[in-house]
Image: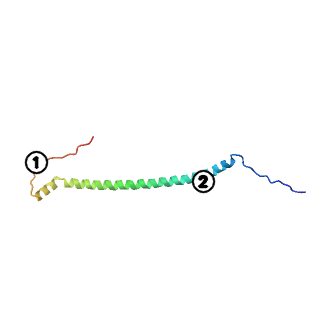
């Protein structure tokens, strides 16, 4: 008894190779793109947090400068500087300057 088995060779159909390659590419690409976008989002969040910290720091500086300005323009300070330079205080000679709002 002889075993003359023929090897059955599987042949791909016309678009079958392309379909398998496309599926393989998607299996590799989807997790890669997912990781890339999460890394990009994380980087953006870190930059946004840094900017918020800078804004908060600048607001604190601005508040301190506003307080210093208010101290310098106080009536007591004006009278002190005037007396240092030998000037006298006359309330009828004071002109108040205000900023006009831009429309």
In the image, farthest residue toward the top: 103
Q: Residue at x 16, y 52 (%)?
A: 75
Question: At 37% across and 55% down in the image, what residue appears?
Answer: 53
Q: Is residue 45 left or right of residue 28?
A: left
Name the one closer to the observer, 75 or 86: 86
Is label 1 in a helix, a strand or a loop? helix
Give the mark toward the camera: 1 or 2. Answer: 2
- Please provide percent x and percent y for residue 89: 10, 52
At x 34%, y 54%, the residue is 56
In the picture, which quadrant includes the N terminus? Answer: bottom right
Which percent across, then down, holds residue 46? 44, 55
- Which residue is at a point 40% across and 56% down the rendered structure image? 50
Q: Which residue is mark 1?
A: 93
Q: Which colour style is shown? A: rainbow
- Determine the residue located farthest toward the front in the rendered image: 14
Marker disc for residue 11: none
Check disc 2 and report the residue beneath it. 28
- How many marks can you see? 2
Residue 64 lies, in percent from the top left, at: 27, 56
Foreground of the two, 64 or 34: 34
Q: Residue furthest right?
A: 1
Give the alpha-carbon distance from disc 1 to disc 2, as whole Å: 81 Å
**Picture quarter with the C terminus:** top left
Q: Is the Cβ of the residue at disc 1 closer than 8 Å to that at disc 2? A: no
Q: Residues within 10 Å of mark 2 (few under 14, many from 20)?
A: few
Disc 2 on helix, strand or loop?
helix
Residue 10 position within the rendered picture, expressed as x and y whole percent measured from the top left = 75, 51
Viewed as shown, does residue 29 lie left or right of 5?
Answer: left
Sequence-wise first label, 1 or 2: 2
* Other-residue count near label 1 (Cα within 10 Å), few / some / many at <14 / 14–19 / ≥20: few
Left-right relation of 69 to 91: right
């Amino acid at each position: 008894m002889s075993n003359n088995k023929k090897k059955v060779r599987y042949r791909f159909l016309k678009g079958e190779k392309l379909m398998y390659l496309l599926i393989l590419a998607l299996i590799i690409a989807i997790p890669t793109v997912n990781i890339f976008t999460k890394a990009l989002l994380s980087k953006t969040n870190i930059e946004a947090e840094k900017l918020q910290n800078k804004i908060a720091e600048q607001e604190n500086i601005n508040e301190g400068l506003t307080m210093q300005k208010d101290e310098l323009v106080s009536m007591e300070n004006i009278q002190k500087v005037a007396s240092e330079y030998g000037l006298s205080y006359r309330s009828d000679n004071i002109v108040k300057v205000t900023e006009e709002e831009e429309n």
